[in-house]
Amino acid sequence: MATAQSVEAPPEGHLKRELGLFSAITIVTGIVIGSGIFIVSADIARQMGSPGWLMAIWLFTALVTMSGALSYGKLAAAYPEAGGQYVFLKKAWGEIPAFLYGWALFFVIQTGTLAAVAVAFAKFVGVFIPAISSQAMVLRFTPHFGISNEQVIAIVVLMSLTLYNCRGVKEGALLQNIFTVLKVVAIIGLIAAGFFAVPHRFPSFSEWTLHTTKSFNIPFLSAFAVATVGSMFAADAWNNVTFMGSEIKNPTVNLPKAMTYGTLLVLILYLLVNAAYVNILPFHLIQHAPEDRVATAAFSQLWGGAGAGIMAAIILVSTFGCLNGMIMAGARVYYAMACDKLFFLSFSKLHPKLNTPVISLVGQGVCACVLALSGSYSELLDYTIFTTLFFYIATIIGMFKLAKTDAKLLKMTHWSSYIVPVFYIVMLAYIALNLAIFKQGYTLPGLGIVCIGIPIYYAWKAAHRRKQAKSALLDCD
């Protein structure tokens, strides 16, 4: 017989603090470095028109992203709980904004990114096994829709990593440590090759200058803002480590350090990788790299077919590590929401022996697999760009609100502690405003996806109240 106790009881057990600083840093670094850095520079180069502006975009991205990591470090140190940004939004603004963030994360942002990265992983498996292709159908339901063996590979890697992470947070962190170290070492090797293999190709001063002959259809500052979209999201997801706030040892010290050191390492590597691209390739080849695969074009230039194979192997390592970290971190948000009775209650259950949110992990994996099969995940991700910026801005403004009562806890007792967060908000607002004006195809659908969550929130709360009332009646009987 159901009872009020069974509905309201907290989850069995609790998440344990088992991850040290090194694991926290590899989570940040391993999640951020996926496939974006190997691709997005082509589009930025086409938009901006010169090597100088390409590097300026990445430098701007580095400054903004670093300011975000430093700002979130204050929140993570003050509120080191499972759920991270979800918790920050709930404390500052209440349940509805926090729920909308979690809603978008589960059904689009996190799972959509997982789907996209898993398909990218499968595509590069196809470099070594040509039979794997988006055109090779395993099942065909209609002339235009079916399941390809590429999608099967994506699903296999998603569910394999999901089940592996069910074994325990230490096991997930161990895999993350290994693959992050491998990808960082490989990228450092590529940077070294990019500079030492072709030491005399770096652009001349006249080529390098920030002057551009491109005719912009919109004001230059707006074009600059729009061009940052690719680089900003190639450098995104550093906040995922906050989702695991309940599992980091000495979190008030290690969480801010992990975001600072991990993000700084990534941004330095990104700047050097782009400098290597410019050193290896004439700029027009960066702009028109086949399928925007700048890294593959660059290292094919150095080593021919072997270079393409080496690059494919590095991207496989990079995307695999990215998937592992995102799977591990994302599930903690839905677990925290379920503990607050804002998601499926079963997601709040921890495995009695493994102490992992197994149902939350599997639920996330299933949703990601559905998106990988749907073929619509890339469009969904485009729609969430503006929304993601909105939640970042709301979180930092919320930090200012929390600082009115928790200034000491947030270490914001002096005016100078507001400089970096204010810079972050202003820069994100600059990007978001220009997207809202010039890229409405990105902004309006994204807001629509979030707004759908509002009636769902109220329906969820109403259903929970009905369960409470029913349980109370049964208990009285």
Image (cartoon, rainbow, N blue to C red):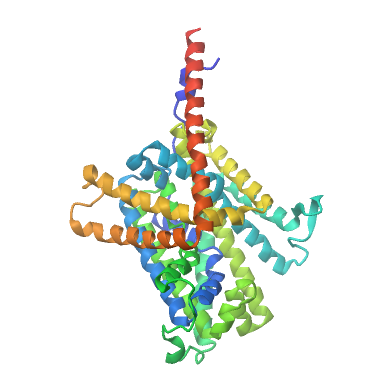
In the image, is residue 406 above or below residue 191? Answer: above
Residue farthest along the left direction in this orientation: 414
- The image quadrant of residue 98 is top left
- Residue at the (41%, 76%) spot, across then down: 56
In the image, is residue 59 above or below residue 169? Answer: below
In the image shown, does 344 or 356 lie closer to the viewer?
344
On the question of residue 331 being in view, the answer is no
Direction from residue 310 to residue 401 in the image, left or right: left
In the image shown, does 432 or 92 lie closer to the viewer?
432
On the question of residue 217 being in view, the answer is yes
Residue farthest along the front direction in this orientation: 217
- Quadrant in which the N terminus appears: top right
Where residue 245 sits: x, y (%)? 40, 46
Where residue 464 sits: x, y (%)? 49, 25
In the image shown, does 162 or 422 lie closer to the viewer?
422
Q: How many numbered marks appear?
A: 0
- Residue at the (41%, 83%) spot, across then down: 210
Direction from residue 21 to residue 473 in the image, left or right: right
Where residue 258 sits: x, y (%)? 38, 58
Where residue 53 sits: x, y (%)? 44, 78
- Residue at the (60%, 72%) spot, across then down: 292
- Residue at the (42%, 68%) spot, across then down: 222
In the image, is residue 74 above or below residue 64? Answer: above
